[in-house]
Image: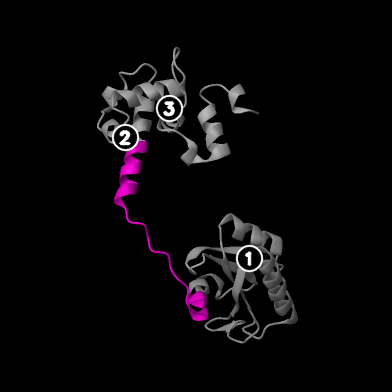
Amino acid sequence: MSIKFLSEDDRPREKFLLKGKSALSDSELLAIILGSGNTEESAVELAQKILKSVDNNWQNLSLLSIKDLMKFKGIGEAKAISIATALEIGRRKASQEIPEKLIIKSSEQAFKILLPHLSDLRTEEFWVIFLNQKNQVIKKTQISKGGISATHVDVRVLFKEALENFSTNIIVAHNHPTGVLRPSEADIRITKNIQNAGEILDIKLLDHIIIGENSFYSFAEAGLL
């Protein structure tokens, strides 16, 4: 449905979904927080009036009290609290430092990251560490779990996650509950499948690690990648 056919109050949300948050004006962002306007104004028009009263400055808006906000027609206590809450979240976000992302420089590092998830299990699980181009960890997640001696890995699911997380490098890993770290034919085959699929998508498989109770086997260190 085209945005122009939506109600005034719904348009900012639809625009957010279609074009992203950066495409919205300040009044449209505030309108989403308001949810609705009043009998005379849409949410966007009400948001414009509120922002105009503070010279279109978010800092000035944050100085208004709940009672000040409730002076605008259509702003009850709940909406006033929603506005104040959103501004407080923004203030706290601005005061926090962006956390440093962990950089993986070796197979041993990857092993230590995944060991708590894969040691002492009675069945096999398959995990992936998604990395950016600097090998900083974006996310680690379980892709599948299986039986005592094998787990099925859907390569399509793996790379869907990689693309959704804008990953350019990956490290995959699974455990061997038997404690035997030697890769099976199935392990070698799935490694090749992942490597070949990654080459098509320009997502590099850096390593496949088999994890035991306190040790690991690295395909990269063994020269199999």
Q: Which residue is mark 2?
A: 58
* Left or right for 54, reference 13: left
Q: Is residue 106 magenta?
A: yes
- Amino acid carrying label 3: it is Leu
Q: Earlier in the sequence, mark 3 or mark 1?
A: 3
- Amino acid carrying label 2: it is Trp
- Tell me which corner region of the image, top left, top right, bottom left or bottom right, holds residue 5: top right
Residue at the spot 63% in from the left edge and 69% down from the top edge? 126
Q: Which residue is mark 1?
A: 202
- The image shows residue 185, relative to residue 126, as above or below, that is below
* Left or right for 109, reference 65: right
Residue at the spot 72% in from the left edge and 67% down from the top edge? 152
Q: Earlier in the sequence, mark 2 or mark 3?
A: 3
Specify whether residue 20 is in view: yes
Q: Is residue 33 magenta?
A: no
In magenta, the rendered stretch is 86-112
Residue at the spot 66% in from the left edge and 86% down from the top edge? 182
The x, y position of residue 82, in whole percent, is 38, 32
The x, y position of residue 35, in whole percent, is 47, 27
Q: Disc 2 and disc 3: Cα gap in Å?
A: 15 Å
* Left or right for 221, reference 28: right
Which label number is shown at residue 34? Answer: 3
Labels 3, 1: front one: 1
